[in-house]
Image: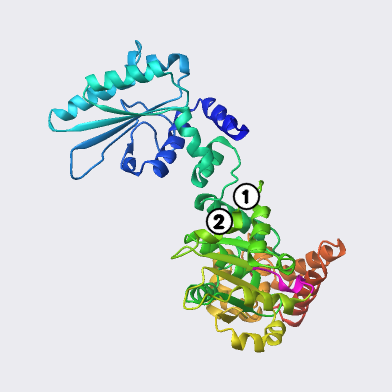
Amino acid sequence: MSSSVATTASALEAMTDRGKFEMLFRAVLEIREPKYRPLIRTGTNALGETIAAPIDGFARLSDSEPLYGMIEATTTDAERLRTKWLVGSKKDKADLVKAAEFADQIRQHDPEASFIVVLATNQRTSADLLVEAYAFAAQQRIAVDIWENSRIEPVLDATPEGQSIRQRYLGIVADLLSATLMSRLSERSLERYASVLYDDPVTLFVRDVVAQTMTALRGGKSLAFLSGEAGLGKSTVTYHVMREWIATGGFALWASAEQVAQSPTLESLLRELLRDVHPRELIDGAATLLGMLGGLRRLLIVVDDLRHAGDPTEVARRLIAWTRPPENQPAHTVILAPARPQLIAAIASDRERATWTDVIETGRLARAETISFLRSRTTVNAYADEIAALLGDDPFLAGSYVRVAAGQEANTRLAEDVLADLVRAELTAVADERFDEAEIEAAVVHLARVEILDLSAIVI
């Protein structure tokens, strides 16, 4: 027996939380026996906690015939399993007895009804107990489908979706990639991307250009460059696109420009990105991921920031080559890369031949966007339009203004005082050497914007 099998079998056997075991088992049934999908949970509440009920699940399984299904799940230890299923105690009837009585109630108004009872246990069972259970069920005119440890364990170990269930409920890390696991890895990659951004993107405004970018990527373009000068919110827009992509069922991974530069092929990049978000090497992970794609299921790769590549132009050209779709077929992998206008100009001739690429411009906020953002995060309702004008609808200044001013009493601080706090924070951060060269450059640009704006007259 392999070590992974032994680990899974013993971890399964050690479960004592019946509600958690029932959720694990339901997930196993979902992928192994779709005929049981109609079964409604009657033995657990919305939190997965066990509640008093004669059976743990019930439903009519067929529209064409009166076939009813029931589930009885237990984490009772192996020594008491016979009592649990067949004998019962003073406090509670045996599971098969309760199922048989429930079946009799239904036969009173549906005499032709037939029944199948799914008995689930996390323990191993003896042949003698199986024979007794089958015999009792036959006497009661019900069928029984027994799922015990040795039947559940192979599903958890040998299939990608089973390993995802195993990781969720038993904490044993998967080494086969499934759609469920990939969705979780997409969320983890999004969190990693957020952690390297200048501002917390969750707190910032979702701009109209997010929807424009989503439309481009869903409309047939397999590579989109988000063009704009430093500090105009390209990375924030990119983050929100990635978050929306995941929320609508897509897969997504964030890649640094350095990772792209060091990867000779798209598949090698995917292997590296999967290592970033999963603690164990996935068996054929990149190939499995590419094989999952198709139809509405697509992969978004976010490459940010191209400035950090040794040769940004070469990296951009590599992205163009990677995203060329097959002849007369839609692309299942799409890439979004924020870029400066200078880089876009440098690859203009490459883009002219690459009809599968697009450039989306991002600049200052629309006035309505700035006003909406200020009003949603501060108490400046009466002054929002005037402040938006003096901030120049600048995404960085608007975000910084909100970050410093949020929570202040209205009409108590001059805007120049608020922005002075920002200047001090920028200079302190640079002095602490927490930023790299590109970030220091952005900070200087931001401070220059503050300097040229007349902010002395605005009260918040």
- Provide residue 328's location: percent of width, then percent of height: 47, 78
Closer to the chain start, of discs 2 and 1, is 1
Specify whether residue 388 is in view: yes
- Provide residue 115's location: percent of width, then percent of height: 24, 31
Name the element at disc 2: helix
Residue at the spot x=79%, y=72% of the render? 438
Task: Work out whether 41 lies above or below 53.
Answer: below
Contact? badges 2 and 1 (CB < 8 Å): yes
Name the element at disc 1: loop
Among the 4 quarters of the image, the one containing residue 266: bottom right
- Provide residue 104's location: percent of width, then percent of height: 18, 25
Task: Identify the disc placed on residue 282.
Answer: 1
- Badge 1 amino acid: Leu
Q: Is residue 178 magenta?
A: no
- Badge 2 amino acid: Thr
State the count of labels. 2
Specify whether residue 459 is in view: no
Q: Is residue 309 magenta?
A: yes
Q: Tell which residue pokes out farthest to the top in this image.
A: 90
Task: Work out whether 212 lies above or below 269.
Answer: below
Residue at the spot x=31%, y=22% of the render? 134
Among the 4 quarters of the image, the one containing residue 375: bottom right
Closer-to-camera residue (214/62) = 62
Closer-to-camera residue (431/147) = 147
Task: Work out whether 271 lies above or below 10.
Answer: below
- Provide residue 205's location: percent of width, then percent of height: 57, 68
Q: Tell which residue pokes out farthest to the front in this image.
A: 1
Relative placement, left or right, of 100 versus 21 is: left
The residue pinned by badge 2 equals 288
Residue at the spot x=61%, y=61% of the render? 253
- Bounds of the magenta segment: 303-310
